[in-house]
Amino acid sequence: MKGNRSWFRTRPGSLFVVFSGGLFIISVLLGLSLGSVPIPLKDIIEALLAGPVTHDGNTGHIILWSLRFPRVIMAFIEGATLGVAGSAMQGLFRNPMADPYVLGVSSGASLGAVLGIVFGAGRALGLWALPVLAFAGAFASTGIVYALSTKNGRTDTWTLLLSGIAVSSLVSSLIAFLMVFFRQRVEEIVFWTMGGLSRASWKAVASALPYAVIGAVVLWFQSKALNAFSFGEEAAFHMGVSVEAVKRRILWASSLTTASCVAFTGPIGFVGLIVPHVVRLLIGPDHRRLMPVSALVGGNALVLADLLARTIVPPLEIPVGVITSLFGAPFFLYLLVKVRKRGM
Amino acid sequence: MEVRVGIAVNNVSFGYGEASILDGINLKISEGTFSVLLGPNGAGKSTLLKVISGYLKPRSGEVLVCNQLVHSMKDKDRSRLITYVAPEYRSSFEFTVEEAVLMGRIAYSDPVIARSPRDLEAAERAMLATKIIHLRDRPVTSLSSGEQQRVQIARAICQDPAVLLLDEPTAHLDMNFELEILEILTQLVEEGRTAFAILHDVNLALRYASTLYFMKQGKFVESIHPGEISPGIIEKVYGVNARIIEDPAGDVRCVVPYSVARS
């Protein structure tokens, strides 16, 4: 029918979605199975059927339930969030360079965490110290950037982009400054700011999941408005979009969902930039399908990247951000060149 | 029969900072008419249209469209009543023509994500009326300026407003498409809609419009019916000497400018 015709507009596009769905199952199973202790598929199914075990019983089951399940789920949530938030930000800014971190979420979160590390907040607040401080830092930097760019209820997107860059670089230099003064903590700081999923836990999943789900739904409901933004804010206004309200919803929903993940894992780069691009090239720019497919692809990408990060040079674990850039960048360049050759 | 007012502008002024762009504008356009706004570059024509559309808030005065205050309406309600087509809209992403035309239904879409059959039908009709149906699956970014212009007019038609504001709708079009767009507008007006357009070409305005408004430096200097055009008006508005001639085949007048007026 006609209604469906626009849903997956090309055959390669719909094949790609089917492929991503299949890849989801494979990447989750691989993520659960591989690691310093390989666990065969049979045991994974057994563990799932046996239900959560944290002590006694099969060691494989314990590894699965206490380490790998939360880790794989966290990776998927974060990848999906970055995919959705990246699509929304690129749509809002009409700029392919935008990503979920444009409002300074990653640098703000890093500063929060670094302050926690250097002042030993862990002793006072326990395990939750760093995530809470990181989340607060992300929230604060988003707020500052937003306030700087809003006047008389109107938020200027160019000012937003520029002040986001300025605040991010200011915060980065503050972090560098702190690193000079607290040399004994440098390793810990670098480890946190490089990002990684080794800190994933059921508690992290439980805290990030509600934000991720609510944020993704809020963003998805702005799809038609985001489509209209492609022609500029003035055009969107004349199509009946409540421009300022939509902008506010997108900025806060994507920054807060991203922050809720980054608070636990540290900033993970490149996924939020590249995934929406790849998906847009394959299935078109309509945000109604761009966002859910970017969630799926982003989630898959991060599960696989994390798998590589912890298995590529055992027993070391490479920061997952390194993997996403190492594999993402060449793939992205390949796509760019290919698209330019096709003359688009 | 009582003539209903489509657009009423009451003593509207607008400016940025110290600079004043519109200065005490008054205007009344009847429903179901085609009026044209003319004037030299920088006269404030586009600004006036955007104030009427609700996009710009006037410093003082008020704008009523079909007896409703434009600037205090909800975005969706306003967009079902009035829309505006800019001289140029560029899409950042490769939406297809059909998707771009369907954006005219945002003001109607109660399902947040899905599209209703009525939306698809409206888009179909708008694409047929503007003769872009054969382009429906083409990305808008691959179209010529003239084709993009027709896509935006189709989007506006798809929106089904009572009042259409058009800023140089024929700016990028060849003679044939130019006339085609004006004929589409004439048809929309015959359906009972009100059209208010900025045109570059006085002669097109004289042929198609029922009223011509001339603007200069943020003020109306003249409002006339096509039969009332005179060399004096052209000189006053554009600073150009012109002859007025009759089209031999009809009762349409044409302006033939021949030199810059020395004052």
Image: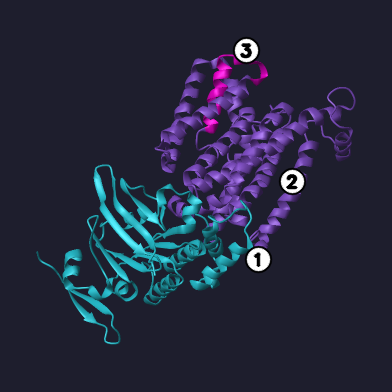
Of the chain colours in the picture, the one used for chain B is cyan
Q: Amino acid at mark 2?
A: Phe
| Front residue of A246 and A163 | A246
Q: Amino acid at mark 1?
A: Lys
* Residue B95 visible in the shown view: no
Q: Which residue is mark 2?
A: A24
Name the image quarter holding the C terminus of chain B: bottom left
Could you say where residue A134 lies in the image, as x and y percent from the top left? 58, 25
- Would you identify the image quadrant in which residue A82 lies? top right
Q: Residue at 62%, 58% (x, y): give it.
A: B115
Q: What number is the disc on residue A2?
A: 1
Could you say where residue B29 lies in the image, as x and y percent from the top left? 34, 63
Q: Which residues are magenta?
A: A105-128
Task: Give the crowd class for mark 1: few <14, some 14-19, many >=20 residues within 10 Å.
Answer: few
- Would you identify the image quadrant in which residue A321 lies? top right
Q: Is residue A150 left or right of residue B249?
A: right
Q: Which residue is mark 3?
A: A124
Say which chain tag 2 marks: A
Of badges 2 and 1, the one in the foreground is 1
Give the chain letter for purple.
Answer: A
Task: Give the crowd class for mark 2: few <14, some 14-19, many >=20 residues within 10 Å.
Answer: many
Callout 1: SS: helix
Assess whether mark 2 and mark 3 are in contact (beta carbons under 8 angstroms).
no
